Amino acid sequence: MSLLFRAALAAVAFGSSLALAPAAGAAPVPGDAGKAVTFPFPANAPVAVQVTGVGAARERLSAMLKAALPDEAKELDKQIDEALKQVLADRKLTAVPKDGRVFVVVNDIASLFEGEPAFAVLVPVSSYKEFKATFLTADERKTLGEGKGVDEVKLSLMGAEHTVHMVDLKEYVAVTPDKGTADLYAGKFARATTAAMPAELARSFVGSDLAVYLNADAINNKYAEQIKGFKMLIDFGLQQAEMGGMLPGINKKQLAAAKVMLGGAFQALEDCRGVVLGAEFRPEGLNLRLQAQFADDTASAAVLKAERPGALADIGKLPAGLGQYAGTKFGKKFHDMMKGLNPEFAPADDDENGNAALEKHLTALHAAGPQGEVSGSGGAGANFTAAKYTDAKKAVAALTGCYEAMTAGGRLHSAVLKGAPKITKDARKHGAFTFTEVRVAFDFEATVKDLPEGLKENTIAQLKRALTEQMTLWIGTDGQTVIQVTAKDFDAAAAAVDAFLDPKKPVGETDGFKLTRKQLPADANALVLAETGQLVTVMLDSLKAMQDTVPGFPRLGKVQPLKGEPTFIGIAVTLKDAATLNVFIPGEALAAGKKIVTRLLTNVE
C-alpha cells in the first residue's frame, strides 16, 4: 500500500479548508449538553487518529503560523494549498462538511507490518451519493463496482492507481484498501463513544486539533501474550547487563532502580485503559499533550490518587536571566517509585559503608517531610534550589549527611568525585539563614572513561556546562525553607538568596515566562520552563556528538546564539485523575527554531 496513497487520503482532512472563514483560537469540545459523542468506528479499535473540524483545524494552524512567522505565514499557507491541490487534483469536496471530523482508524496493529494494512479513513459527508458524484473523478466513477454494502473503485492518486473499498455509514464514508476491514464496517458493530472512554482522555481526544487515541483495553486484550514476551526479553537483557557490566556509567543501584521502573511501566500498561497524544494549534503557540488514564482499584490509579498537584508559584520568584526553571511537588508513593533512578548521590558500588550511610541519610531526608521545591540553573557554578520541609533543620542535617557519605570514585550529579567532599558546618550566616559549606572536586576524565571514544569529548563539554571541576555549594535554612545554592563565592550565593527572598527582577514578571506559564495547567506536580536558546544549544550539541559516532552523519557548523527577549519552552506533568504531560512551544520559540534550523542547514559541512 503506497505511503503516498495514505497521505493523499489523510489530506482530505484539510482539503475543504481552502475556502473557510476564520475559526476560534482553540479546538472546541462539542457542545453536547452532557451527552456522549458517538464515533463512526468500532469500540474495540486499538488506534484512532482524528482531526477536529476539517477546516477549523487548518484555519487554526494558519493563525498559529501567522502569529509565529508573520513574514512567512502567507507563503507557507500558499505552499500548503498548492500541495493539497496537487494531491486532490480535480476532486471536489463539496460533500465534505466544513466542521466534520476526519478519522484514520487502525483495526489490527499487526496488519501494519504484514500483508494489507487493516485501516480505514472515515470521511464526513453530506451524503454518500454526493460524495461519489463529486469526490470521484469521471474516470474513477467508470470503475465503480457496487456491491452488497461494499463498493469497489480504482482511485488515481499521485500518478498511481489503487483499488479501495468504500462503505456508506450515512454521515461518514469508510475508505479502506482492505476488504476485510470494509466488511467489518458494512456489518453491525458497536460504535466507540466518549461515554465508554476514560473521562479525561475523552476530553483531550475531542478537544485537540489533531489527536491519536490508543485503546489500551483493546490492546491488552488482544496482545497480552506479546506484551508478556516483550517484558521477559527486557528483563533478560537487564539481567545480562547487570552480570556483564554492559552499561557504562550506570551503577548497580541505578540499574536496580531501572528494573523497578520498567516493572512499574509494564504494570502501568496492564492497568492502563487508554492513552491520548494530542496537538492544539493556539495563537500563542503549539501545545502537545500526552495523557494516560488507568482503571480504578489498580496500583497505578492508587499512585495518582495520592498526588496533590499545586501551582508551584515560587518558580516565578526566581531571578530572571537563568537558563532553566523547575519546580516539583510529588507525594510519597511517586517519590518512592522514582527513588534511585537518577540519584543525585551515588557512592561507588564497592563502597559498602558509603552506600549504607547514604541510605540512612536519604531515609532521614524523606522523614523530614518534603513539601516541594523550586530551582533555577544558570549553567556551571550557578544553581539555586529552595525547598519546603515539615522539619527544615532535619532536612539540612540529612542533606549534609548525604555529602558526608560520598568518597573518591562516587558520583555526584552523575560526575565522578576526585575525593571526599570537604564540609564545614555552620560556616556562614546570612540574615536568618545558617549555611553549611560543601567543597567538591570532579574528575571529568574518569567520568567518561568507559564511554565510546567519539562521545568522550562532547560529554565532557556537556559536563562543563553544568558543573565546574572545583565547585562550592552552601546548604542552609531559616527553620522554614531549605536553600541550596552553588556560586563562585559566598557573596554571589548570598545575592542569589536575597534575589529569591525579596525579588526585584523575578522571572515571573518577564513577558516570555508569563506567556508560557499561562498556557500550561494551573496546577502541576512538575514544571520546567527552559529558555529556548539554551535548550536548542544543548540539543545541537547532542546532535554534534553523533558526528563522531554515526558514520555519514553530517558535520554541523556553528550556529550563532539567539538575540532578543528570552522565550521559554514549557513542560508540565500533572498527576490527578490521569497522568498528563503538556509541552508548550510559544510562537516566538517556533520562529527561533526555524531560524536556527535554517542557519544549521546552510552551515552543514
Image (cartoon, rainbow, N blue to C red):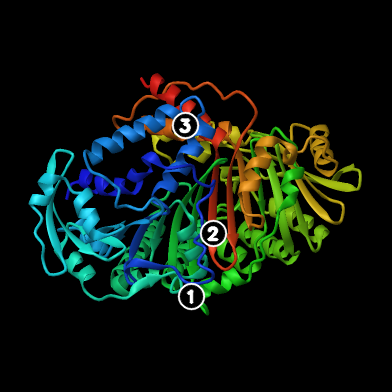
Cα distance, mark 1 to mark 3?
40 Å
In the depicted view, which residue is nearer to us: 464 or 216?
Answer: 216
Q: Position of residue 428 (x, y in %)?
A: 87, 42
Instruction: Name the side, left or right, on which 578 lies relative to 124.
Output: right
- Residue 580: which numbered mark, if any? 2
Q: Secondary structure at mark 3?
A: helix
Q: Secondary structure at mark 1?
A: loop
Q: Upstream in the sequence, badge 3 or badge 2?
A: 3
Q: Upstream in the sequence, badge 1 or badge 3?
A: 1
Cα distance, mark 3 to mark 2?
27 Å
In the depicted view, which residue is nearer to us: 66 or 591?
Answer: 66
Residue 180: name its quadrant.
bottom left
In this figure, which residue is indicated by the disc labeled 1?
A: 295
Q: Secondary structure at mark 2?
A: strand
- Amino acid type, residue under disc 3 in the picture: Leu
- Amino acid type, residue under disc 2 in the picture: Thr
- Residue 479: which numbered mark, if any? none
Q: Position of residue 416 (x, y in %)?
A: 57, 43
Residue that lies at the very extreme toward the bottom in this rendered image: 297
Instruction: Name the side, left or right, on which 454 lies relative to 71.
Output: left
Residue at position x 59%, y 32% in the image: 465
In this figure, which residue is indicated by the disc labeled 3?
A: 540
Considering the image in quadrants, where does the C terminus appear? top left
- Amino acid type, residue under disc 1 in the picture: Ala
